[in-house]
Image (cartoon, helix red, strand yellow):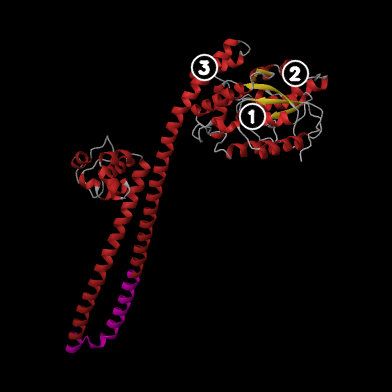
Amino acid sequence: MIDLNNRISTALVVLGFHRSGTSAFAGALTKSGLAAPKTLIPSVAGENDKGFWESALLSRFNDDYLTSRGYAWDQFWSNSLDLGILMTHTQAELDSLCELILSEFGTTSQTIVLKDPRLCLVLPVWQAALERLDISPVYLFALRNPSESAQSLALRNEIPLEQSLLLWLHYVLNAEKMTRGAKRVFIEYADLLSNPVETVEKILMELELPVDLSTSSCAEVRQFVDKGLWRHKANPVDGVQKGWVYNEVYRSIVSLGSTKSLQELDHSYAQFGAILTDVASLISVRERLISDLSTRVDSATSRLAVQSSELQALRDEADALKACVQTHKAKADLLISHQQLFENSWLGSCATFIQRMSHRVLSNSMAARAYLKLKKIDNANDRLREMKVLQDSGLFDSAYYLEVNPGIKWMMTHPLLHYITVGHRLNYNPNSNFEECAYTKGVSQFSEGSGLFHYVKKHSKN
């Protein structure tokens, strides 16, 4: 049973994309006298040195909420663009969120600070929970140049720039649309870094929060906000900064307050929806290609493992043959020593002659078998060495080889192995710039192996 008799009256909800300064805003507001959650996510050196200032429990709730609907914070297109699924919630989810909010902030009478970039995606369930707890939300949009956020996210999560900009649009446009009509303020990250105390005062004043900054609070805010942590700054001539995301969307949000800005954002929202449809189609194709390539790589790896196992078996058999040859040789030497008594007699000479001929026939037979086995091993070793050299050189183009010789795809063999064993004999070219036939004819005293292998060895020596 949820106790709705809480003393919390107002929640300041910090909204913004990842790496947009939301942690700095939340931390500075907490230093000014607002209440932070109990179970804060620990700081991470080099990522958020001054802390994240968000609840670990509430952040986990947001992740679970997204996951249960087939979404992730960095892949909003994973559920066929059915964004409406994020707008609905179950009674159990609402009860759980209400309990988490009360457990994190207790019975404080201060204004609480709610911060998690994922709030931009799951805001409807949070608005419902705050309404049920009779807590009035006010909203702070932490805004940072999209190019800077994308660069920082690329460093932390290795997300491509284009994907980060689409995510930025998704987060910010959805949050802006879901807070229209509510009390909100839009502040740039650069303003907080340049004038931390003045910026915090502006936020408190515009949101009409009854907090008077004391001298000690001002000192704590100044000490907390570190301009040196502003690691990624947009280049004034950055192509991204000049584009649609920055010039139309970002600047429209910064200058919100006019009807014109809202109209521009509605237009941007419509454009973004059209872009999402195209992006989802492209990503679907990409994922199918990646899946197909992964299957082929796994198949090639399995075949290579089998071939390696067969090669090891041949080596073991060769070692056994070598041991057998040595054993027979030792036995033959022992027989010869026993027959030395007969060497001076005619019978002994005949016996010696017959024994030597028998030994020679036996040795020649065993040696021939051993030679054939060793020759087979040497050939396999040569192929492996040649394959490794060509792989390391980067000159063999598998895609080109398969495109020019499509029949190889059905042979279930690796294109490089096919070229080394068969293709070069048929004058198949290893890439678009290397003519196998012309090269081998132009080289005097050409030894066995492919033309490309000869070319790589020749140039590696030079």
x, y percent for residue 360: 22, 75
- For label 2, the SS is helix
**Mark 3 and mark 1 residues within 8 Å of each other at the beta carbon:** no
Residue position marked by numbered label 3 in the rendering = 267
The part of the image, by quadrant, that contains residue 93 is top right
Question: Which residue is more in the foreground, 411 or 215?
Answer: 411
Magenta segment main secondary structure: helix
- For label 3, the SS is helix
The part of the image, by quadrant, that contains residue 307 is bottom left
Q: Nearer the viewer, mark 3 or mark 2?
A: 3
Alpha carbons under labels 3 and 1: distance apart: 22 Å
**Vertical relation: 235 (above or below) 402:** above
Residue position marked by numbered label 1 in the rendering = 124
- For label 1, the SS is helix
Q: Does the magenta run of residues contain 337?
A: yes
Label whose residue precedes the other's in the sequence (2 or 1): 1
Question: Which residue is more in the foreground, 353 or 295?
Answer: 295
